[in-house]
Amino acid sequence: SMMKPYNPIIGELCIAEAANANIPGQNDQAGRRKWALLGREPGSSPVPAWRAMVEQVSHHPPITASAFEGQADGGSFAQTVSTIAVPTFCGNYVEVSMKIFGAQSQIHLPDGSTEVYIVKSLPSIYLRGVMGIGPSFCEWAGELLVECQTTGLVGRVEYKPAGYFGRGERHSVSGAVTLANKRDVKLCEISGNWTRSVVAKMAADGAVLQVFAAPAGKQPHVEMADLPKPLPYTVPAHSLLWQRHPDVVWRELTSALHAEDWNAARAAKASVEQGRREEKKAMTAAGQTWETSLFRPDTATGDKARVPWIVREGAFDRAFDRQAKPPCRPM
């Protein structure tokens, strides 16, 4: 069971937000437009640069629903996505494939226009060297496919694996931007290594644009451990008290794993899973069904096998309200 120590239970919730960003220009036209995009009165209160919430909305299949919203440079964005992570043991490596559906991003630009993007596919995560053969490292492998419904542009990036024993080139990518109705005509080609340098070469004039480069004055990143730290964010203290926050649900298991006490880890995992079975049994006996807290299925799509999950009305405000009651059921 320690090959997969964490087995998310239905109803797990977590939220996070960026450090507050003060928006300048409250007394000029551009500043007032920024506040209007956020639905706030100028100077009313600091506004998070972004905030996010995640809920395990299903156990079989294991569906995770996520939502993000935020603002930057006078515009704003919002994204919802539903994913199923499927781990597969492949000998000396583990592949975690990401099945994605209902992944929509909306970017509201300062001029008032909106662009809508749909993420069609995500690459898999490969955990190499799990049997001690060859180097141990993580890499992406597979296709990232994004379509812009507003402009008709399609972006495709292929993450290339290093090979079974990890001896080939690592973290290389290739791809292109095309039109949805003319995918054989490339507007630009993408190539490089996502831990070092990625460029886009424009088909029209041959101009080369730097998409990503290792920070100036630093050696190129070699492995995941050497990558830059994530941008600063905070986990609201009130959410750490929720009985279905992952830190609470898996606290004993995590402590046992850190202590390398495998018997205690197995017992802690079994206790969580058995508790959820008993909860489900009691709900069935009482004629109750599980109701998600922050997301609901968008049944209007008509696709019962891949129903996307969307944010319930007011869910963001409820989740981040420190005075509100916990949005999840007690354990």
Image (cartoon, rainbow, N blue to C red):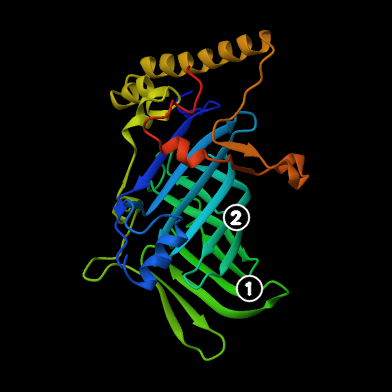
* Residue that mark 2 sits on: 104
In this view, the residue in front, 41 or 179, is: 41
- Residue at the location (45% across, 36% down)? 319
Q: Is residue 178 left or right of residue 201?
A: right
Q: CA distance from mark 2 to mark 1?
A: 15 Å
Q: Position of residue 201 (x, y in %)?
A: 50, 81
Q: Which residue is mark 1?
A: 151
Residue positioned 29% across, 65% down in the render: 24
Residue, x 60% and y 33% (percent of image)? 62
Point 44% across, 45% down: residue: 52
**Number of residues whose C-alpha sits closer than 10 Å to that of mark 1, classed few (under 14), some (14–19) or many (20 or more):** few
Q: What's the amino acid at mark 1?
A: Thr
Quick one: label 2, few (<14), some, or many (20+) residues within 10 Å?
many
Residue 70, placed above or below residue 176: above
Looking at this view, name the residue that lies furthest to the bottom.
Answer: 205
Q: Is residue 286 above or below residue 186?
A: above
Residue 13 in picture, x, y percent from top left: 47, 32
